[in-house]
């Protein structure tokens, strides 16, 4: 097994919930912020562009371009937002990062605020991150008292607020998140206009994932060349992977994007049992099979937000497909007609699987739903949620055939235990 | 509802009066304090500058439980994929059986609510259970039962 690469974003002791929070605050060097004080906004953006950093929330958009776009807007009231909703099943890397190094995120948000001349920043947290919320509020209080929530001494007022949202996966979608911050229903809005043009309260907004922001701090501190030298071409910098499911030691693993699925599973103690498959980038991502174990988890190969849920050969693919369908069915917002109707049909297909004579028409119907959603839905939730189930049908037809014959010992055993 | 509860509720709502954007903050504060959204709250929330229909629609979108039965102990068993692979459905069943509870229904006598939840984002400790907002590793069933008993006592 390859040695685990060095950690830059993680690998520290957990500071949230520990009595050492003040010591952590006092000893934190704020190196990125100090450096940013001597840089122009254009210089900061140039450094981000040269680093090759792409967003770590799933869509992999170049960070420098996003910040530049906000800087170019005529509107002068602007916001910066850290997306810590993390509602995708199997995703917990941002939690671990915030528990270990919350100041790296605050530091980057201050830099973002100064760069795009925002008047306020927000950190939006998953409902369950109470301890993180408490620590962030305390850290921000100390920073405020010492006048350190700004890039340039004496610069205009900039403040950061923390909001813990109500658990809804859709709230992590950027435009839905703005609505949640505004105190409204977290329903996505169509694009254009993009958040960089009209985001929070209709104003130009930078929204970045927690890990993305921590990476910004690293780039400003260590330089774009240092960052760009890590990882394969077009996949620069360290990346966090959340491993869970049938692995011996579920954990967040920091590696560069040349790491293969086999490497990551190895670092997480190996598969428990025999590897059957993995959901990479979570249930909204891509299905990896045994033949894909040697693929590096690059952006092009679909690493997305870095979530890896491993399952072994004792699992029934139909059970997994039902889990995924139920999740997206219950979490979609129902706002747009294609999303609402497709989710209803996807659920009916999976619920009624045992009444079907053959798998092929079910597969075709599910694929059609996915295609319709890709072209017409308002946001990415319903389309990404209907991608993996057809892949499961194609990869494991025998599992589905057992259900068509009403003869799945795995699911029957599960049902008997529950009863 | 007791008079004291109404006074507390009025005080909590008044802090956000005239600030429609703070409805969700207020709702979370009420959840922390009462364990539910008291039935009198939506009418009072109009002080924030929102219409009754808007308030109802926002509360229902986020699945806030509006009820006068205060919850003393809220147990959420994560049912998302990573926890499902660690038999969270069996765990939910075992907890409901131990406490003679029905999933998603507040037990009027003990004020206990056990329900399935979506991802609690603690997949490294799957199956994850949250007891009054604190995450516990569900693998230790006796420890979990003791923790719930303590919260109820
Ligand atoms: C349904 C859905 C849920 C999402 N959830 C999250 C999330 O929890 N965290 C996150 O950073 N991005 C999430 N995203 C992506 C955001 O919309 C957005 O692209 C991201 O926050 C931008 O930050 P980045 O460029 O740094 O990745 C989600 C997208 C969709 C469609
Ligand atoms: S695609 Fe789905 S989640 Fe997105 S707006 Fe439409 S119904 Fe809502």
Image: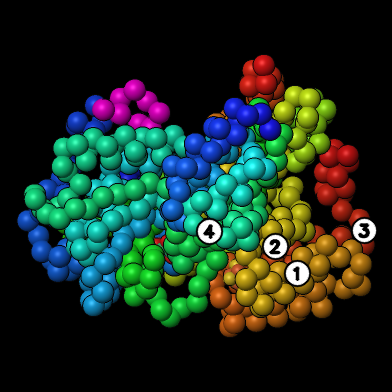
Mark 3 vs mark 4, CA separation in Å? 52 Å
- Chain-order first, disc 1 or disc 3: 1
Let me know if residue A17 is in the magenta part.
Answer: yes
Q: Is mark 4 within 8 Å of ligand 2?
A: no
Mark 4 vs mark 2, CA separation in Å? 29 Å
Start and end of the magenta stretch? A11-22
Q: Which mark is residue A329?
A: 2
Query: Which sits in the foreground, B139 or B60?
Result: B60
Residue B128, percent across and down? Answer: 61, 36
**Quarter of the picture holding the N terminus of chain A:** top left
Q: Do the residues labelled 3 and 4 touch (CB within 8 Å)?
A: no
Q: Using a 10 Å C-alpha cutoff, classify the residue at mark 1 as few (fewer than 14 neighbours), some (14 to 19) or many (20 or more).
A: some
Mark 2 vs mark 3, CA separation in Å? 24 Å
Mark 1 vs mark 3, foreground winner is: 1
Q: Name the residue under label 4.
A: B50
**Quarter of the picture holding the C terminus of chain A:** top right
């Amino acid at each position: 097994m390859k040695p685990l690469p060095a950690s830059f974003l993680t690998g520290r002791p957990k500071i949230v919930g520990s009595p050492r929070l003040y010591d952590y605050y006092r000893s934190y060097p704020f190196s990125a912020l100090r450096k940013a004080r001597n840089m122009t906004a254009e210089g900061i953006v140039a450094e981000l562009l040269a680093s090759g950093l792409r967003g770590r929330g799933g869509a992999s958009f170049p960070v420098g371009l996003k910040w530049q776009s906000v800087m170019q807007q005529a509107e002068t009231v602007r916001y910066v937002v850290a997306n810590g909703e993390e509602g995708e099943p199997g995703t917990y890397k941002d939690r671990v990062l915030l528990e270990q190094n919350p100041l790296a995120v605050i530091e980057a948000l201050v830099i973002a605020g100064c760069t795009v001349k925002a008047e306020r920043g927000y950190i939006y947290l998953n409902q369950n991150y109470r301890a993180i919320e408490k620590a962030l509020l305390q850290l921000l209080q100390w920073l405020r008292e010492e006048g350190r929530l700004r890039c340039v001494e004496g610069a205009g007022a900039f403040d950061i607020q923390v909001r813990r949202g109500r658990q809804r996966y859709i709230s992590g979608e950027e435009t839905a998140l703005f609505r949640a911050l505004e105190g409204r229903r977290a329903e996505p809005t169509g694009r254009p206009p993009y958040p960089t043009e009209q985001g929070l309260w209709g104003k130009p907004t930078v929204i970045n994932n927690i890990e993305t922001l921590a990476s910004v701090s690293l780039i400003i501190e260590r330089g774009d060349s240092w960052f760009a030298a890590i990882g394969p071409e077009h996949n620069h910098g360290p990346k966090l992977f959340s491993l869970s499911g049938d692995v011996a030691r579920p954990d967040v693993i920091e590696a560069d994007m040349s790491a293969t699925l086999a490497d990551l599973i190895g670092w997480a103690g190996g598969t428990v049992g025999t590897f059957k498959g993995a959901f990479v980038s979570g249930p909204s991502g891509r299905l990896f099979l045994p033949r894909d174990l040697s693929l590096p988890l690059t952006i092009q190969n679909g690493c997305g937000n870095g979530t890896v849920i491993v399952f072994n050969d004792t699992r029934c693919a139909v059970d997994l497909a039902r889990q995924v369908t139920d999740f997206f069915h219950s979490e979609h917002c129902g706002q747009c007609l294609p999303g609402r109707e497709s989710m209803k049909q996807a659920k009916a297909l999976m619920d009624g699987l045992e009444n079907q004579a053959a798998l092929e028409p079910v597969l075709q119907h599910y694929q059609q739903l996915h295609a319709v959603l890709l072209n017409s839905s308002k946001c990415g939730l319903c389309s990404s949620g209907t991608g993996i189930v057809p892949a499961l049908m194609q990869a494991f037809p025998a599992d589905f055939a057992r259900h068509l014959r009403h003869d799945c010992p795995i699911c029957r055993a599960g049902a008997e235990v529950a009863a | 509802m007791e008079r004291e509860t109404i006074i507390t509720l009025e005080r909590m709502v008044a802090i956000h009066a005239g600030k429609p954007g703070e409805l969700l903050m207020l709702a979370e504060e009420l959840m922390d304090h009462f364990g539910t959204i008291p039935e009198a709250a939506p009418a009072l929330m109009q002080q924030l500058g929102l219409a009754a229909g808007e308030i109802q629609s926002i509360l229902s979108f986020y699945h806030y439980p509006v009820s006068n039965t205060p919850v003393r102990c809220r147990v959420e068993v994560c049912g998302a994929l990573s926890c499902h692979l660690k038999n969270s459905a069996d765990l939910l069943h075992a907890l409901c059986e131990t406490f003679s509870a029905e999933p998603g229904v507040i037990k009027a006598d003990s004020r206990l609510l056990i329900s399935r939840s979506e991802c609690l984002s603690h997949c490294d400790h799957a199956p994850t259970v949250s007891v009054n907002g604190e995450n516990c590793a569900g693998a230790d069933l006796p420890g979990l039962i003791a923790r719930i008993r303590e919260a109820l006592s």
